[in-house]
Amino acid sequence: MELQANGDIGVIVVAAGRGTRMGTVESKQYLMLEDKPIIIHTLEAFDRHPLISQIVLVTGEQDVDRCQAWIAEYGMRGHIQVIAGGAERQHSVYQGLLQLSTPWVLVHDGVRPFVAAEHITACCEAVKAHGAAVLAVPVKDTIKQAEEQDWVASTLDRRLLWSIQTPQAFRLKDLLAAHEQAEAQDFVGTDDSMLVERLGIRVKLVEGDYRNIKLTTPEDLDYAAFLRQQARS
């Protein structure tokens, strides 16, 4: 299914976390990757995508002003709204949902700057065909399920296992309902698709690639610099 740009897909980019595994005073999403902050690289992937009509960046309250300044400095194409998030990622996504006027929504991690345009398109196509979709890659390693005291309980079938990435794509009304149910039941999920699954909605897997990494540790920054250099060569 080939989509036409018609202004019905919005994006929430989540960048409100502080993060500790990077080992830096500065939050990881604001560290420089070559010539720009990581969050700007991420925003550019969606700002230049023809199917995306609305972008909401959710960040820490103390970071709203500088993010707005960077958006202006780096000459983004479309209007990007910057708002303050909540205490948890889940709360930040919900705040972003309240700002959107599009029937469809993508949710993306602010520290995944290498998402490819074709995979954004694939998520947009899949959500309109199936109602919910997540970008993912097949697991490469053998995965063991553990029991107490670090004994192996079982070996999982790798052929059925996927590592979930972002963006994740949903009907806006479904994701809002999922977040509201989670809040009412005091449930915190590890990603947005987990909340939607609790409504009984099936989620389609969309195969991405292994370059779409989440920058979490200092080693990730080294790999990110390599990917940027490779893209230029």
Image (cartoon, helix red, strand yellow):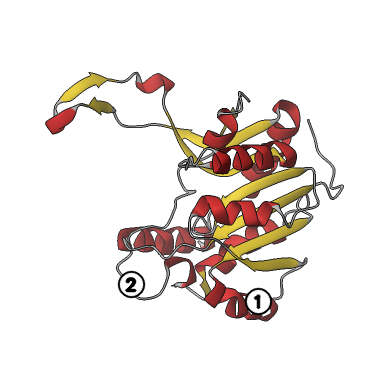
| Residue 24, numbered label | 2
Residue at 26% over, 26% down: 145
Image location of residue 228, percent across then percent down? 48, 62
Q: Earlier in the sequence, mark 1 or mark 2?
A: 2
Residue at 42% over, 70% down: 27
Residue at 51% over, 36% down: 136
| Residue 19, numbered label | none
Which residue is label 1 attached to?
68
Tell me if residue 7 comes above or below residue 221 in the rendering: above
User: Cβ–Cβ below 8 Å for labels 1 and 2?
Assistant: no
Q: Which residue lies furthest to the right in this view?
A: 6
Total number of numbered discs in the rendering: 2
Whether residue 33 can be seen here:
no
Q: Give, as a three-letter code, the residue at label 2.
A: Thr
Rendered image quadrant of residue 139: top left
The N terminus: image quadrant: top right
Q: Distance between the residues labelled 1 and 2?
A: 23 Å
Tell me if residue 184 comes above or below residue 114 in the rendering: above
Q: Is residue 24 left or right of residue 29?
A: left
Image location of residue 20, percent across then percent down? 33, 63
Q: Give, as a three-letter code, the residue at label 1.
A: Gln
Image location of residue 166, percent across then percent down? 55, 45
Tell me if residue 151 comes above or below residue 31 in the rendering: above
Rendered image quadrant of residue 119: top right
Classify mark 1: helix, strand or loop.
Answer: helix
Disc 2 crowd rating (10 Å Cα; few below 14, some 14-19, many 20+) is: few
Residue at 55% over, 53% down: 91
Viewer-closest of 114 and 11: 11
Disc 1 crowd rating (10 Å Cα; few below 14, some 14-19, many 20+) is: some
